[in-house]
Amino acid sequence: MLTFILRRLASMLVVLFCVITLTFLLVRIAPGGPFTRERKIPPAIEKQIMARYNLDGTLWEQFSTYLGVRKNSQGNYSGLLQGDLQLSTKYRDRTVRELLAQSLPISATLGLAAFLIATTGGVWLGSLAAVRHRTPTDTGAMLGALFLISIPTFVVGPVLILIFGIKLRVLPVGGWNSWTSIILPAVTLAGPYIAYIARLMRTSMLEVLHQDFVRTARAKGLSESRVIYQHALKVAILPVVSFLGPLAAHLLTGSLVVESIFNIPGAGPFFVNSILNSDVFLLEGVIIVYCVLLVALNLFVDIAYTWLDRRIKLES
Amino acid sequence: MLTANSPPPPGTWARLSKNPVAVAAMVILAFIGFMAIFGPIIFQTDPHTTSKDQFQPPSAQHFFGTDNNGRDSFARVLEGARISLLVGICGALISLVIGTTYGLVSGYAGGRTDAAMMRFVEILYSIPRLIILILFTFIFDKHFKTWLTAQGYAELVGYSKIIILIVTLGLIEWLTMARIVRGQVLALKNLQFVTAARSLGQSHTRIIFRHLLPNLGGIVIIYLTLTIPAVILDESFLSFLGLGVQAPQASWGSLLSDGAQVINPVKSYWWLLFFPALVMSVTLLALNFLGDAIRDALDPRARR
């Protein structure tokens, strides 16, 4: 188990390094510099600004400064290794770290809420459909799931706003003021993934319900709910666990749209705006922080999966 | 499970045409495809003509109403259908070629190569691909435009974003296909007909292309049907954020984005959101239903 974790950690570092390099290169070959304006800046001033932001020098020099293995224009080491994400070139005098520290917790809360809704909702709906196999409940649940997968979040979001925010006036239409303002965006974001997980869960539960250990549990005279929710669920949930990594990635990207629909001051708008403004450091910062989060989450899911899987193998 | 160790079981088409859901889905898709191609000719509408009739509700003259520039919304939805379907189908085809090749090679090679290749897929699954995709389209669009002009294809410049979108979406949506194909190849390659081919001294290329590939037909069709809606969704996601198709061109995503902006408590121009949403959702639903139905028809025993 320990070697497994260490191996995964090593591969995680390699992945992160690749992502950082790729992001850095892509952002630097993007058209239009951060200080390209309609009005031309005098070359001398432009040179100074570029030096201030460590945007002068060769690509290699810039990269090593950004990583923090080379002294910057202030004469110290301050890069990714030191936890410094540089200054935003658009929001003057604010560091990327400040901007992300403000917005990321909001995105993370939204993502976590959606994650909880998607997993509990999906597992419940999928198991229910499997247990009531070939009944109207099953058909209805799977039809509903297909609808949820097919209707994009940016349709569901405005419709929910229209119903609950404007017509019924029971929930806020957007913003991030009270705990009630999290409900609509989280449900919107979770919608398609409730459906994905429900479909995964139903298939795997149907397979598990035919296995010997379930029959044994029934033969022991356990109540049906104990058979399903204690014995079968433990095994049937494995495919769902392996979907959690991709799920986190989907929720992160999905929250870009949901944040823009509901006017939530999360990290999503920074991402889109920094591309449009060529705000190089903010863009690199957002992508790198997202990837670090995701890769770490995936490592966690991997470990959890292996542990669960091993326990099941040992038990059976 | 009945794996595709034989060509699609006889009667697949018969089973599919007996499934009312599948037939309905095919009829709807045919209708939407027909309207996307011939609609603008039949109804003589132009999606880019502006007029003074702003925000007109649906009427006999403007079936889907008009937008903030007085453009006919029906014509815009038809143009959106053309672009969204084009991107969806072409993107899915590219991902199909990449995914099938990758899965075939991985599954056929087996052992360490297979493990490494599948680990790479897992890694790609876990990075936010859409974010990298947005970066890609943004960066290469301008370079591609300059290149097109330099090559003397100036008339194509207006379509450069669409071309870039198709290629990059194809480049990121192949992962599931690769996994599925690999699984199928693993099941197939130990069957007797492959052993027979190998003992006859046939080359790997020949075994892959003559024996394995034809047997993947069913599974590939299923996932092609399911990849098209995924690509359409991805494209509309980008256009919704304002990073996809450029105005005045429209895709379903950019129409929905415009529609969502005019939803407010004071006055809602619901038709600008409702009709694009309806057409897009119906298309995606039909594709997803059809994919499921083909799966059931190809593999009756897997149906539960």
Image (spheres, rainbow, N blue to C red):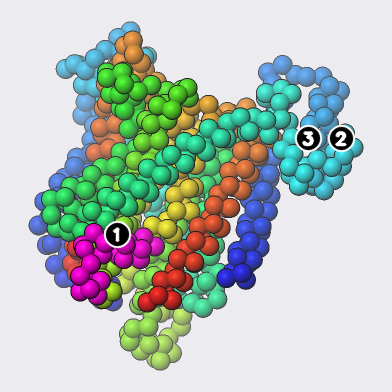
Left-right relation of A49 to A21: right
Q: Mark 1 highlights which residue?
A: A229
Amino acid type of the residue tagged 1 in the rendering: Tyr
Residue range (magenta): A215-238
**In which chain is the residue bearing label 3?**
A
Amino acid type, callout 2? Ser
Residue B195 drawn above or below residue A213? below
Q: Which of A286 and A198 is in front in this view?
A: A198
Observer-side mark, 3 or 1, equals 1
Under mark 3, the amino acid is Leu
> In the figure, residue A35 lies in which quadrant?
top right
Q: In what element is the residue under mark 3?
A: loop
**Labels 3, 1: one chain:** yes
Taking A261 as reference, is B217 above or below it? below
Q: Nearer the viewer, residue B39 or A176?
A: A176
Q: Which mark is residue A73?
A: 2
User: Is B207 placed above or below B259 here?
Assistant: below
- Of labels 3 and 1, earlier in sequence is 3
**In the rendering, which numbered label is found on residue A55?**
3
